[in-house]
Image (cartoon, helix red, strand yellow):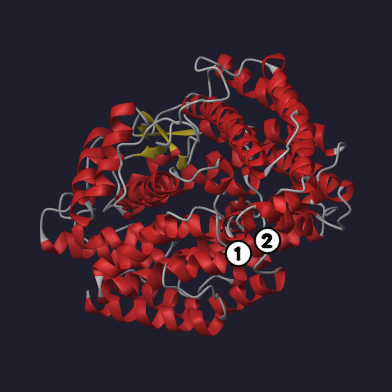
């Protein structure tokens, strides 16, 4: 059966059709009923699982909308309060009930009769949640939920003045493509100086987050938050030692390629030394790529691109557009970054981003589009929990979409020369992101295995790791004051700790799928959709296998994939 983007909101059988999450008093009776309900057969258990799943979907969607609305307008106090109310007043009461329901499920004699193939990963995850649950961590998780949002509030206010106008940092970034090198440097320094104004606030925020996260780990019986978080993230299939292998592979086989890219850039620009404000610039005879001018144009052109790749992908975007599930343009008071937020009941997710008319916005749009397609493909699965797939496959969905769509970017780039430049830019970006991923990941390993570090030790550790993954060609002399706080621009460190190496693991998977696509586009897309439609019902190695991939991020595998990308870049 071919997938359909004509998504239907899940019908309610357990909750009243008009039920809305208002407070704990409204929710509690449903949790209590599920807890008290006798289970006399496998059929009773399956009905109980579906009712639990329906409740979970309603709560999840409500929480998502609170977060979406708040990130779209960080200056609206009512939206902030609605989000905080959920995190502080509702979620803490759900957690002990959810733990009790988990225990009821695993203690039920009929659980052993459930289809092992379909339920294995879910039951493994339930057991993991029981193992990690501690009453003492409920208030800490609530405090962390609120604290983490402060990053968006602090950075959402950041703007600079340039040529008499105010710009968000995302909008200002387009001046880094200016032909005038002195303008590029001036804007680069303004952006960095603006970030430094909040360095103390962000340092203090991060210190609070690290301390609370370490306490969560100690409460759960772990020596440090890294080891706790590996278990919480469900990293059943790899270890911190595997992450170190990835770091080593990046150093050995990716950094030399980045060095080549930067040397080529330096020659093309004709500059004596390549500086950070040169990285987005084009040679004097080339205009910067301007693929679109406003959010609606970005959306319509993206739909045209996806239509050529596979009409189902385009239909997903059309469905989301009809539902008003896009907020694309950068503006003051909007949180930074971009995301695709799955909506468990509606099925059609929400895409949020900060577009400013640049090439990178096209990449972000198709990246989030890959996540959106994943949401659509997993939506028919019978339980909400089955749709909770590991991030290491979620990011394959998004990053493979970036590479799949490249041959169809004509709506954004009118002529062949522009299209070639855009593709080369995309492939270079696919390579140059690896050292940053390794840097952020290695830094987090250091931070959480040294939880009592001082601010000076943190800055030194960051600089040391950053230099380890830097190239000789990029000249950063005199910029140490900016560099020692450059970690502060990475949202993930604040909001989703340890969620970053997934991008590296998945980029390898995406390149593997793109290799397949170059040989047989139809088979590659079939593999892609087959893997995504499994949601989280298989282990990571099995999901990769469904996509025709090996779950492998050893230096040897990294080397093989880098050689392929290098050969493709040479063709351009």
Instruction: Determine which of the numbered discs, if any, sits on residue 439 in the image.
Output: 1
Q: Is 563 on the left-hand or right-hand side of 67? A: left
SS at badge 2: helix
Q: Nearer the viewer, residue 172 or 533?
A: 533
Residue 99, percent from left and from top: 78, 39
Label 2 packing within 10 angstroms: few (<14), some (14-19), many (20+): many
Quarter occupied by residue 87: top right
Residue shown at 60% from the left, 56% from the top: 115
Q: Is residue 282 visible?
A: no
Can you say whether 40 is above or below 423 in the image? Answer: above
For marks 1 and 2, give the CA distance. Answer: 6 Å
Quarter of the image with the C terminus in it: bottom left
Label 1 packing within 10 angstroms: few (<14), some (14-19), many (20+): many
The answer to whether mark 1 and mark 2 are in CB contact below 8 A is: yes
The residue to which callout 2 is attached is: 443
Can you say whether 253 is above or below 84 in the image? Answer: below
Q: Nearer the viewer, residue 297 or 123?
A: 123
């Amino acid at each position: 059966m071919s997938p359909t983007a004509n998504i239907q909101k899940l019908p309610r059988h357990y909750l009243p059709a008009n039920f809305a999450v208002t407070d704990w008093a409204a929710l509690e009776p449903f949790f209590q009923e599920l807890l008290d309900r006798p289970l006399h057969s496998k059929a009773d258990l399956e009905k109980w699982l579906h009712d639990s799943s329906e409740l979970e979907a309603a709560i999840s969607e409500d929480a998502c909308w609170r977060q979406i609305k708040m990130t779209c307008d960080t200056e609206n106090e009512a939206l902030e309060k609605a989000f905080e109310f959920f995190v502080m007043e509702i979620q803490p009461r759900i957690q002990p009930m959810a733990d009790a329901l988990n225990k009821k499920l695993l203690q039920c004699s009929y659980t052993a009769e459930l289809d092992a193939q379909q339920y294995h990963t879910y039951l493994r995850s339930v057991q993991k949640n029981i193992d990690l649950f501690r009453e003492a961590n409920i208030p800490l998780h609530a405090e962390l939920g609120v604290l983490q949002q402060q990053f968006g509030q602090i950075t959402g206010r950041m703007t600079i003045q340039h040529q008499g106008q105010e710009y968000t940092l995302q909008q200002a970034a387009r001046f880094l493509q200016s032909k005038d090198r002195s303008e590029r440097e001036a804007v680069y320094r303004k952006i960095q100086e603006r970030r430094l104004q909040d360095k103390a606030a962000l340092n203090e925020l991060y210190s609070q987050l690290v301390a609370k996260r370490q306490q969560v780990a100690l409460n759960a019986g772990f020596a440090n938050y890294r080891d706790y978080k590996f278990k919480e993230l469900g990293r059943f299939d790899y270890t911190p030692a595997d992450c170190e292998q990835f770091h080593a592979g990046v150093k050995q086989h990716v950094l030399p390629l980045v060095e080549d890219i930067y040397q080529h850039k330096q020659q093309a620009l004709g500059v004596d030394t390549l500086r950070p404000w040169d990285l987005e610039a084009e040679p004097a005879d080339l205009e910067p790529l301007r693929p679109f001018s406003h959010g609606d144009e970005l959306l319509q052109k993206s739909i045209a691109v996806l239509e050529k790749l596979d009409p189902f992908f385009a239909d997903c975007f059309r469905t989301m557009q009809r539902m008003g599930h896009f907020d694309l343009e950068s503006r003051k008071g909007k949180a930074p970054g971009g995301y695709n937020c799955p909506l468990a009941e509606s099925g059609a997710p929400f895409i949020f981003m900060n577009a400013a008319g640049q090439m990178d916005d096209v990449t972000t749009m198709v990246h989030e589009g890959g996540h959106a397609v994943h949401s659509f493909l997993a939506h028919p699965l019978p339980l909400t929990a089955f749709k909770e797939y590991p991030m290491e496959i979620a990011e394959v969905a998004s990053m493979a979409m970036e590479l799949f769509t490249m041959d169809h970017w004509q709506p954004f780039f009118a002529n062949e020369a522009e299209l070639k430049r855009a593709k080369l830019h995309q492939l270079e970006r696919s390579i140059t992101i690896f050292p940053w991923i390794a840097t952020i990941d290695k830094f987090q390993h250091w931070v959480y295995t040294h939880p009592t570090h001082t601010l000076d030790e943190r800055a030194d550790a960051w600089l040391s790791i950053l230099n380890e993954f830097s190239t000789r060609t990029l000249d950063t002399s005199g910029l140490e004051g900016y560099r020692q706080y450059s970690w502060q621009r990475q949202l993930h460190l604040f909001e989703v700790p340890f969620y970053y190496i997934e991008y590296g693991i998945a980029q390898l998977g995406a390149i593997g799928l793109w290799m397949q696509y170059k040989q047989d586009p139809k088979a590659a897309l079939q593999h892609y959709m087959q893997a995504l439609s499994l949601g989280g019902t298989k282990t990571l190695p099995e999901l990769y296998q469904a996509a025709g991939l090996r779950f492998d991020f050893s230096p040897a595998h990294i080397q093989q994939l880098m050689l392929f990308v290098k050969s493709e870049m040479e063709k351009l």
